[in-house]
Image: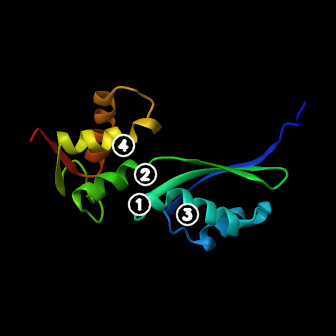
Amino acid sequence: MAAQRKISRQLTLELDAGNAAIVDIGKMLGPTGVNTRQLTLDYDAATAGQRGDIVPVVVTVFDDRSYALRFKTPPTAYLVRKVLGLAGGSARPGTETVARISRQQLREIAERKLPDLNTDDVSAAMRQIAGTARSMGVLVTDE
């Protein structure tokens, strides 16, 4: 019977896909003794197809200094900003609107985020994405 590896630490990092900074990884994982250079190479190789996006990764560090990576979809606010070409959201959401997003754009974001959301229904996912957009000062339109 194989011995079970014990988890010593688990954390989530949001890094640039295909171009992660080893300094950022080293700050978070340096005390664990993980080979940060190899982890950076593994991350960059796995996310090279999404270059330019922010791709969160859950790093599980085991007691033998090995690690496992689990990739997630980019943050919802990042995807909304990317689709609309925004630098940021509204300083006063609810009273100040910075952009408009269509239902079709919401659907595209929802379909991309579906694996990480707590639903399998695209319309429910669209409502979650719309809530994030509204909290950023983005108006949802029926166009």
The mark nearer the N terminus, 4 or 2, is 2
Give the residue type at disc 4.
Arg
Residue holding disc 3: 44
Q: Are marks 4 and 1 in contact (CB under 8 Å)?
A: no
Give the residue type at disc 3.
Asp
Q: Residues within 10 Å of mark 3 (few under 14, many from 20)?
A: many
Mark pair 3, 4: CA separation: 20 Å
Mark pair 3, 1: CA separation: 12 Å
Q: Is 30 situated left or right of 95 in this image?
A: right
Q: How is the image coloured?
A: rainbow
The mark nearer the N terminus, 3 or 1, is 3
Name the residue at 54% across, 67% down. Answer: 20
Does residue 97 appear in the picture of this structure? no
Q: Quadrant of residue 27?
A: bottom right
Q: Are marks 4 and 2 in contact (CB under 8 Å)?
A: yes
Residue holding disc 1: 53
The picture places residue 59, in percent across and down from the top left corner, at 65, 51
Name the residue at 62% across, 73% down. Answer: 23
Residue holding disc 4: 112
Q: Is residue 33 above or below residue 126?
A: below
Q: Residues within 10 Å of mark 4 (few under 14, many from 20)?
A: some
The mark nearer the N terminus, 3 or 2, is 3
The mark nearer the N terminus, 4 or 1, is 1
Mark pair 4, 2: CA separation: 9 Å
Mark pair 3, 2: CA separation: 15 Å
The picture places residue 90, in percent across and down from the top left corner, at 25, 58
Q: Is residue 122 above or below residue 5?
A: above
Give the residue type at disc 1.
Asp
The mark nearer the N terminus, 2 or 1, is 1
